[in-house]
Image (cartoon, rainbow, N blue to C red):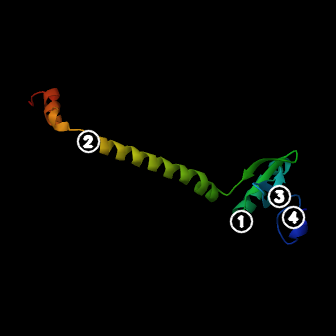
Amino acid sequence: MKQGALLASSPIPADIYLTCVCRCGHHIYMKSVNALRVRQSLGRILDDLDRDGEPVLVEKGRLPRAVLVPLQLFRERFVDKTVHEERRALERWFEERRHSHDKADTRDGPDAVALVREMRGPLP
């Protein structure tokens, strides 16, 4: 089913189709375009992507190969999530170190200031 037939007033070229992407029994319809069309008019497809904000499925030989997504969606789904996960891991690491430091009795060992003064030597 061609999108041009569905949305006659749409500026999207008629060779961009609506494709059903089945996942876990759910049917998701999204715009799809073949790889040749991507090579011929990438700028127009990117403009449509910015304007509509809907992902575009890229097919090669009638098989799904990739999905173009808006930059904001990519950041929300991947970059921001990764940064958030790394920050949480770092916070857990510091929290573990703090608790292990609290449990250790460091008062029996040498004073850090005394060690630094000893390594530095006498001041001129």
Q: Nearer the viewer, mark 4 or mark 2?
A: 2
The mark found on residue 51 in the picture is: 1
Label 2: which secondary element: helix
- Residue placed under numbered mark 4 in the picture: 3
Which residue is nearer to you in this view: 117 or 50?
Answer: 117
Q: CA separation, marks 1 and 4?
A: 16 Å
Answer with mark 3 or mark 1, whichever residue precedes in sequence.
Answer: 3
User: Mark 1 and mark 3 in contact (Cβ < 8 Å)?
Assistant: no
- Residue placed under numbered mark 2 in the picture: 103
Label 1: which secondary element: helix
- Residue placed under numbered mark 3 in the picture: 20
Q: Quadrant of residue 33?
A: bottom right
Give me the residue at 17% from left, 27% from top.
Answer: 119
User: Mark 4 and mark 1 in contact (Cβ < 8 Å)?
Assistant: no
Q: Position of residue 83 (x, y in %)?
A: 50, 50
Q: CA separation, marks 3 and 1?
A: 22 Å
Label 3: which secondary element: strand
Q: Which quadrant, please, contains the C terminus?
A: top left
